Amino acid sequence: MPLLPRPRYHNEAMNASSFAANRRVIVALAPDRSVLEHVQLTLRDEPCTLLLTHDRGQFLTAIIDSCVTCAVVALGDAATAEVTQLARCVRVRAPCLWTIGFGSAHQSLMPMLIAATRAGFDEVVLHSAREPYALRAAVRRACCRSEVPVDDLLREFANRLTGALLVLLRRCLPLVTAQTTVTQLAAALRLHRNTLGNRLARARGPNSERFRAWCLLIRLGHLLDDTSWPIERIALHLDFTSASALSHLVTRYLELTPTTLRSSGALPTIADRLVSECKSPIAPRRRTFVPDALPDDA
């Protein structure tokens, strides 16, 4: 695992291309040195290169580089208008870059955090004593987005699942790790977890919890088929607590061991099981007071 460089500030050159040998480059912007050091401490064990600055101009210059994986913006106590303008600048300069807003879970900051989401940040992470590693999890999801060959994985499912379910798979596969909850997955899609469940039901898919597990199994199948990694390394890559936790998931859903799954062709086997589950009859959902004229997402 490469060592992280010391923090880089506005009076030092920021050049992401010089770190292209490291496939993960994270650019972070924060208002002061203490926040930058907090970001570095949070991400110190991640296999990535950190480029840190509190200069907005250098941040906007650095994110243009194609080797940058994601950008982190510490929102601090910035004004809502300033955050909105920055988010729009990022979208203009790097429209495909995954951008994470990072702020304190303080009630007074909620309007600014909501404005950041609406302005174009892909994810907004709240730091609190209860969730001290929320930023690390968000960065891992962003890195997974850039590394998961989604289109290749979904070829196994072409013409076998509904179009709406394929869309949800395409969006969720890069986001899921073993530590991702349904609530976090829905939030990354800017949905309430109930809305995600409704969309899965309309797409004739599994429920939210099983959908999360199937996404994880699809990623597992890809690694079993396309790499020679031992199970322990795959478990670490997908953020399982142990190899036995990975084996338990495979046994629960497929009634196989990871070794047997690999020898039988992991991804085709997983695809067959998921398609079979989605073809099972789905009981009609009971509507209560919501009229048909209103969308379920309202």
Image: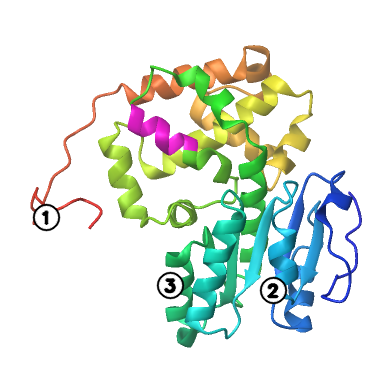
**Residue 12 location, x and y as percent?**
89, 71
Which residue in the protein does label 1 denote? 290
40 or 82, which is in the foreground?
82
**Disc 1 to disc 3, C-alpha distance:** 26 Å
The amino acid sitting under disc 3 is Ile
Q: Main secondary structure of the magenta part?
A: helix
Q: Nearer the viewer, residue 292 or 50?
A: 50
Give me the residue at 73% from left, 62% from top. 61
* Residue 83 located left or right of residue 149: left
Amino acid at dot 2: Arg
Q: Which residues are magenta?
A: 163-170
Left or right of 264? Residue 37 is: right
Q: Secondary structure at mark 2?
A: helix
Q: Residue furthest top?
A: 264
Give percent across and percent down for residue 100: 59, 62
Q: Please report the residue visible at 53 percent of the width from the left and 75 percent of the height from the top.
A: 83
Dot placed on the residue nearer the N-terminal end, 2 or 1? 2
The residue pinned by badge 2 equals 56
Q: Is residue 127 visible?
A: no
Q: Quadrant of the C terminus?
A: bottom left
Looking at the picture, which amino acid does disc 1 mark? Val
Residue at which label 3 appears: 114
Task: Give the label, 1 or 3, closer to the camera.
Answer: 3
Marks 1 and 3 in Cβ contact (< 8 Å): no
From the viewer's side, name the closer residue of 170 and 65. Answer: 65
